[in-house]
Amino acid sequence: MNDSPRIVPSLWFDVSTEEAVDFYVALFNGAPHKRSDSRLISLQRYEKGMEVPGAEQMEGKVLTAIFELDGQRFMALDGGPIFTFNEAVSFYVECEDQVEVDYFWDRLSAVPEAEQCGWLKDKFGLSWQIVPRQMGELLSSPDRKRALAATNAMLKMKKIVIADLQKAFDEA
């Protein structure tokens, strides 16, 4: 049986793949409640003699980087400015507590005007959802009045504050 993941997100960076991969691996390895190692698996660069269109301009840049963040495998590449990230795809990080929410938020948030309801954009243009595990429990409560109160509190937030969600839920 093959232990490799069957679906691996592929990230197209302009020219910052190596910097991004190093940043993400260090970020996840430093997380307060790290669940598994994050690591660079392999890195291949464009080199002289490759028969790839535009290879001479790309020499030394990253052709492919394979890495894992908290057990999730990714592939990334330096592909030039042809494609860019947008909010239609984001990476959902389920956090154990407010300490972990604050850790990821403080290190990833780079575009304050893009922040809403736990969503943020990082310095490489990737969108992330930094969400406490408890949020799902509160918002999906069978007590719909309390769940709606927590939902309405969440809709007013940028970074999710668990105590404020819980307060709205408890006071409903």
Image (cartoon, helix red, strand yellow):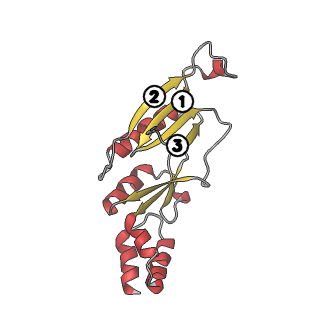
Disc 1: which residue: 64
Residue 93 figure quarter: bottom left
The number of callouts visible is 3
Judge left or right: residue 15 versus residue 94. Answer: right
**Kind of residue at badge 2:** Ser
Instruction: Tell me what residue is drawn at x 42 percent, y 69 percent.
Output: 135
Judge left or right: residue 74 versus residue 35. Answer: right
- Which disc number belongs to residue 42? 2
Quarter of the rendering occupied by the N terminus? top left
Q: CA distance from mark 2 to mark 1?
A: 8 Å
| Callout 3 secondary element | loop
**Kind of residue at badge 3:** Arg
* Pointers 1 and 3 in contact (C-beta within 8 Å): no
**Dot 1 or dot 3, earlier in sequence:** 3
Mark 2 closeness class: few <14, some 14–19, many ≥20 residues within 10 Å? few
Residue 49 visible (yes or no): yes
Mark 1 closeness class: few <14, some 14–19, many ≥20 residues within 10 Å? many
Instruction: Tell me what residue is drawn at x 47 percent, y 69 percent.
Output: 157
* Pointers 2 and 1 in contact (C-beta within 8 Å): yes
Tag nearer the camera, 1 or 3:
3
Give x and y (percent) for residue 143.
Answer: 44, 84
Give x and y (percent) for residue 88.
Answer: 62, 55
Between 86 and 11, the one lying in front of the other is 11
Disc 3: which residue: 6
Q: Is residue 126 above or below residue 154?
A: above
Instruction: Tell me what residue is drawn at x 46 percent, y 41 percent.
Output: 73
**Dot 2 or dot 1, earlier in sequence:** 2
